[in-house]
Image (cartoon, rainbow, N blue to C red):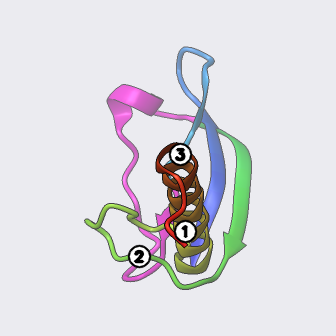
């Protein structure tokens, strides 16, 4: 489970997206005061969602497994088709 789409307005009146909070262990997060200021204003509470995501520290950290694998499969298919066009199919 996680919370995505959180936006905060910092001390310089700049709206910034807050990184997704993945609730694997806890929802407690500390705000970087140098980035968000001492009293940031909440612009968007974000939305809660649930799904199966890649583990933290991996190349697709926190991304949805099904959507990511679907995207990789489509990209691999396009790559194979491009090679077939360039080198000709050996069927």
- Is tag 2's residue or tag 3's residue first in the polypeptide sequence? 3
Q: Residue at x 59, y 80 (%)?
A: 66
Look at the numbered discs 2 and 3 and tell me whether their residues touch, using CB distance below 8 Å.
Answer: no
Q: Quadrant of residue 3?
A: bottom right
The stretch of residues the image draws in magenta is 20-40
SS at circle 3: loop
Q: Residue at x 64, y 82 (%)?
A: 50
4, 41: nearer the viewer: 4
| Quadrant of the drawing holding the C terminus | bottom right
Residue 70 locus on image (x, y percent): 61, 72
SS at circle 1: helix
Q: Is residue 81 above or below residue 2?
A: above
State how far apart marks 2 and 3 are (Cα): 19 Å
Residue on which the image places disc 3: 18
SS at circle 2: loop
Look at the numbered discs 3 and 1 and tell me whether their residues touch, using CB distance below 8 Å.
Answer: no
Look at the numbered discs 1 and 2 and tell me whether their residues touch, using CB distance below 8 Å.
Answer: yes
Residue 72 locus on image (x, y percent): 52, 65
Q: Is residue 31 magenta?
A: yes
Residue on which the image places disc 2: 54
């Amino acid at each position: 489970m996680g919370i995505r789409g959180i936006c905060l307005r910092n001390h310089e009146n700049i709206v910034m997206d807050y990184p997704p909070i993945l609730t694997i262990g806890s929802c407690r997060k500390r705000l970087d005061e140098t980035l968000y200021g001492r009293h940031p204003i909440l612009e968007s509470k974000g939305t809660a969602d649930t799904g199966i995501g890649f583990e933290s520290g991996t190349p697709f950290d926190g991304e949805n497994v099904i959507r990511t694998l679907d995207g990789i499969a489509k990209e691999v298919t396009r790559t194979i088709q491009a090679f077939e066009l360039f080198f000709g199919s050996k069927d």
